[in-house]
Image (spheres, rainbow, N blue to C red):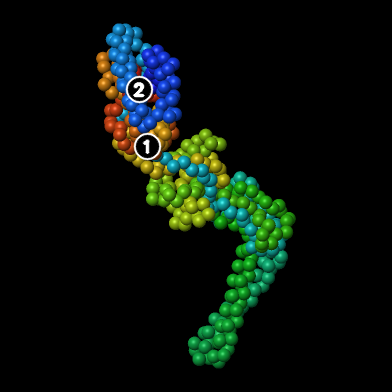
C-alpha cells in the first residue's frame, strides 16, 4: 500500500506542479530554511491524507460491487484440552549382573568337561574337573591318620576321665587329633578346587578351553562363560536436569530396533552419583526376558515419561511462525460470518514442551479457539479469509 501512496504522490507532484515544483523541492532540500522544510512537509502530508481517503473510498466501492471475491482459502481446527505426556528419549544397553567368566582355582590338566556350549545348568552343577595330581591318595592317607588320632584321643580321654594316666598324654592326643583333622579339611578344600561348578543358574555361553589343556589360576585362563538371561536390565545415562522427574518405579517404554520389539517396564534403580564429565546419572530399567530373546549389549531406545499435563492445549508445530523479536505466533480466526468469511488475527503464544509433531501451548489460547492450519503461512494479520473444510 505504501508503494501505491508513493506512486500517486509522485504523479500528483509532477502533474500539478510541473518540473519547476520538483526543482523547487530539490532546492528547498538543499538550501531551504527550517521553516521552508516544515511547510513543504505539511503540504505533502496533507496531499497524502487526501489520497488515503480516496483509496479507502475506492476499496469500499470495489468490495460493494465485487461479487466474486478472491479471498485466501484456509482450513481451521478448534483447540480442545487433552492429556499430554512428554517423554525423554535415551539410548541404553542391555546388561545382566549374572554374566561371568569362570576361571580355575587349581593348577593342572583339564581332565574332563561335562557341559557343552548352549547347555542350561543349575547352581552347583559340575562343569569340569582338573587332574588333582595324586591329591586324592594323599587325602586318603591323611584321613587314615586322622582316624587313628581320633581313636587314640578318645581312649586317652576315657582314661583321663578315670584319673588314669597323665594330663600331658591327654593333651598330646588331643593336639594330634586336631592337627590331623585340620590337615584333612585343608586337603579337602584344595581337592574341591579341582572341580569347576556353576556359580548360578544360567546357560553356558562358551566353552573356552578343551580337555587336556593345562590351566592355572590367573588372567587369560578362563574355562567357561556363563550367562543368566532371566535377570536382565537396561542401563542408560540421564542428563542431570531431569533428576527431579526420574524416580524409581517410573514407567518406561523400551524399543529394540534390531528385533522390532517394544516392551513396557519400569525404572528399578536410580543412581546417586552424577558423572562430572558429562553431568549425567545412571539408571537401571527392568527387562523381562522369559523367552530369552534379549541378549547382553543389545542396543535399546528408552522413552521415559518425565512430564504430564491432563489439561493441555496442543497444536501442530508446523503452523507456528516467529517474528523479528523472536516471539512465536499462530493465526486465529474471528468474526466469522455465515459465508465462512472471517478475519485472521496474529496471536502471540508461549510454547511448552514438544512431543513428535505437536507442541503444548501455555498461554493465550483458550479451549475452543479456532486456529488456521492449512494456509497459515500465506495470510497476514487482519486479512479477510475464507474457511473451507479442506484445501
Question: Which numbered mark, 2 or 1, is in the foreground of this view?
Answer: 2
Q: Could you tell whether 311 is left or right of 260 in the image?
A: left
Q: Secondary structure at mark 1?
A: strand
Q: Quadrant of the N terminus?
A: top left
Q: Report which residue position mark 1 lands on.
A: 351
Q: Quadrant of residue 316?
A: top left
Note whether 143 is above or below 7 in the view shown.
below
Say which of 246 and 70 sits in front.
70
Note whether 264 is above or below 179 in the view shown.
above
Q: Quadrant of the C terminus?
A: top left
Residue at 44 percent of width and 29 percent of height:
30
Q: Report which residue position mark 2 lands on.
A: 44
Q: Quadrant of residue 264?
A: top left
The dot on residue 246 is: none
Instruction: Specify few, some or many for label 2: CA neighbours under 10 Å numbering under 14, 14-19, or 20 or more.
Output: few
Residue 375 visible from this viewpoint: no
Estimate the x, y position of residue 338 in percent, counting from the top left: 26, 14
Note whether 1 is above or below 317 in the view shown.
above
Q: Secondary structure at mark 2?
A: helix
Q: Give how far apart the Cα atoms at labels 2 and 1 are.
A: 46 Å
Residue at 26 percent of width and 17 percent of height:
337
Q: Could you tell whether 263 is left or right of 333 in the image?
A: right
Q: Quadrant of residue 374?
A: top left
First reached walking from the N terminus: tag 2 or tag 1: 2
Say which of 331 and 77 sits in front.
331
Amino acid at each position: 500500500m505504501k508503494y501505491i501512496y508513493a506512486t500517486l504522490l509522485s504523479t500528483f507532484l509532477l502533474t500539478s506542479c510541473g518540473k519547476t515544483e520538483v526543482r523547487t523541492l530539490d532546492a528547498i532540500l538543499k538550501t531551504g530554511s527550517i521553516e521552508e522544510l516544515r511547510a513543504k512537509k505539511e503540504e505533502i502530508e496533507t496531499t497524502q491524507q487526501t489520497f488515503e481517503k480516496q483509496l479507502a473510498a475506492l476499496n469500499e466501492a470495489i468490495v460493494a460491487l465485487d461479487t466474486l471475491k478472491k479471498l485466501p482459502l484456509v482450513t481451521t481446527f478448534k483447540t480442545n484440552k487433552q492429556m499430554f505426556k512428554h517423554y525423554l528419549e535415551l539410548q541404553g544397553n542391555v546388561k545382566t549382573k549374572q554374566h561371568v567368566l569362570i576361571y580355575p582355582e587349581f593348577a593342572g590338566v583339564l581332565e574332563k568337561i561335562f557341559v557343552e556350549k548352549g547347555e542350561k545348568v543349575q547352581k552347583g552343577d559340575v562343569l569340569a574337573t582338573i587332574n588333582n595330581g595324586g591329591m586324592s591318595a594323599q587325602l586318603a592317607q591323611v584321613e587314615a591318620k586322622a582316624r587313628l588320632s581320633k581313636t587314640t584321643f578318645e581312649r586317652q580321654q576315657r582314661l583321663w576321665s578315670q584319673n588314669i594316666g597323665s594330663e600331658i598324654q591327654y593333651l598330646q592326643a588331643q593336639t594330634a587329633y586336631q592337627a590331623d583333622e585340620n590337615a584333612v579339611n585343608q586337603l579337602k578344600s584344595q581337592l574341591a578346587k579341582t572341580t569347576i561348578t556353576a556359580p548360578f543358574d544360567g546357560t553356558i555361553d562358551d566353552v573356552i578351553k578343551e580337555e587336556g589343556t593345562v590351566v592355572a589360576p590367573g588372567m587369560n585362563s578362563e574355562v567357561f562363560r556363563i550367562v543368566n538371561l532371566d535377570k536382565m536390565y537396561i542401563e542408560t545415562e540421564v542428563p542431570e536436569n531431569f533428576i527431579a522427574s526420574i524416580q524409581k518405579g517410573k514407567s518406561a517404554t523400551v524399543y529394540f530396533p534390531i528385533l522390532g520389539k517394544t516392551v513396557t517396564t519400569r525404572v528399578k534403580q536410580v543412581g546417586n552419583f552424577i558423572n562430572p564429565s558429562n553431568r549425567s546419572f545412571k539408571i537401571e530399567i527392568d527387562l523381562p526376558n522369559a523367552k530369552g530373546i534379549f541378549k547382553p549389549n543389545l542396543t535399546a531406545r528408552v522413552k521415559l515419561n518425565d512430564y504430564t499435563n491432563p489439561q493441555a492445549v496442543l497444536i501442530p508445530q508446523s503452523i507456528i511462525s516467529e517474528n523479528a523479536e523472536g516471539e512465536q505466533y499462530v493465526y486465529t480466526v474471528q468474526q466469522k460470518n455465515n459465508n465462512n468469511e472471517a478475519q485472521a488475527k496474529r496471536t502471540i503464544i508461549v510454547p511448552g514442551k514438544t512431543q513428535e509433531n505437536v507442541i503444548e501451548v501455555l498461554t493465550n489460547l483458550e479451549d475452543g479457539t479456532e486456529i488456521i492450519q492449512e494456509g497459515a503461512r500465506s495470510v497476514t494479520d487482519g486479512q479477510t479469509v475464507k474457511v473451507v473444510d479442506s484445501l
